[in-house]
């Protein structure tokens, strides 16, 4: 029996999602040289199905990274709604993302292995951080003569923090995250007193944490 268009589209969407999820799992484990066959086997789809969706493994991995970044970006937006000012929005997002390194290690490892994509991608954290940096600078909270350079600094601090927390499981993650956030705020031109106050504000309950790498 011929499938209806809607049913066919749903099946195609499930196949693509399974491939992306499989790729995210390999990226999270640092297995970037895995052959396409292993990716399709992990996703439980055929080789032919892979090429119905992606031209190459590199294209799939880019989709996997973009998907993870957007997943995290949407999650941060859901928790940051109603922030009083862009400096608070930026601080809250950095502190939440830092806490996710321990709460959701698979997602965290995808972010760490994404490297420069964290800065240059049109999805996820980069655009949102750039938005908050521009807004906080315009409002006088940040002193940032070069927003692109500031974004690179923020991304580097975040990736370094994540690597440290994953490598040192005994380290107090909340303390480490807030200390790093404080240092980043100082680098963005915030006074020590204001940075300390921003880092002391409560953050929303982190329920329904996003996951990656699961079919």
Image (cartoon, rainbow, N blue to C red):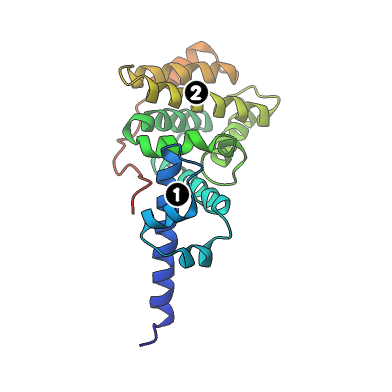
As drawn, the label of residue 193 is none
Q: Position of residue 148 (x, y in %)?
A: 67, 31
Q: Position of residue 155 (x, y in %)?
A: 55, 29
Of circles 2 and 1, the one toward us is 1
Q: Residue at x 35, y 21 (%)?
A: 173
Q: Position of residue 12 (x, y in %)?
A: 43, 69
- Horizontal relation, residue 83 to residue 104: left or right: right
Residue beneath label 1, please? 23
Q: Residue at x 48, y 17 (%)?
A: 182
Look at the image and tell me in which quarter the N terminus lies: bottom left
* Residue 77 seen in the figure: no
Q: Quadrant of residue 139?
A: top right
- Horizontal relation, residue 120 to residue 15: left or right: right
Gap in angstroms between the C-alphas marked 2 and 1: 23 Å
- Work out whether 8 lies above or below 43: below
Local secondary structure at mark 2? helix
Look at the image and tell me in which quarter the C terminus lies: bottom left
Q: Residue at x 58, y 39 (%)?
A: 117
Q: Quadrant of residue 30?
A: top left
Q: Residue at x 43, y 53 (%)?
A: 39
Count every numbered label the image shows and give the total.
2
- Identify the mark nearer the N-term, 2 or 1: 1
Crowding near the residue tagged with mark 1, few <14, some 14–19, many ≥20 C-alpha atoms within 10 Å: many
Residue beneath label 2, please? 160
């Amino acid at each position: 029996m011929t499938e209806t268009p809607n049913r066919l589209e749903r099946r195609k969407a499930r196949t693509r999602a399974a491939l992306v999820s499989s790729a995210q799992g390999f990226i999270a484990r640092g297995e970037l040289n895995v052959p396409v066959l292993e990716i399709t086997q992990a996703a439980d789809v055929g080789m032919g199905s892979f090429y119905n969706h992606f031209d190459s493994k590199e294209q799939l991995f880019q989709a996997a990274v973009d998907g993870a970044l957007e997943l995290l970006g949407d999650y941060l937006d859901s928790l940051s709604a109603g922030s009083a000012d862009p400096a608070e929005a930026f601080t809250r997002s950095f502190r939440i993302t830092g806490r996710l390194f321990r709460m959701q290690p698979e997602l965290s490892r995808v972010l760490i292995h994404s490297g420069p994509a964290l800065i240059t991608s049109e999805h996820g954290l980069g655009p949102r951080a750039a938005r908050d940096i521009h807004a906080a600078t315009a409002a006088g909270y940040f002193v940032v003569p070069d927003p692109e350079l500031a974004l690179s600094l923020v991304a580097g601090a975040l990736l370094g923090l994540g690597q440290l927390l994953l490598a040192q499981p005994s380290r107090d993650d909340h303390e480490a995250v807030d200390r790093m956030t404080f240092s980043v705020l100082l680098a963005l031109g915030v006074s020590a007193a204001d940075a300390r106050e921003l880092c002391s504000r409560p953050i929303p309950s982190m329920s329904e944490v996003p996951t990656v790498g699961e079919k």
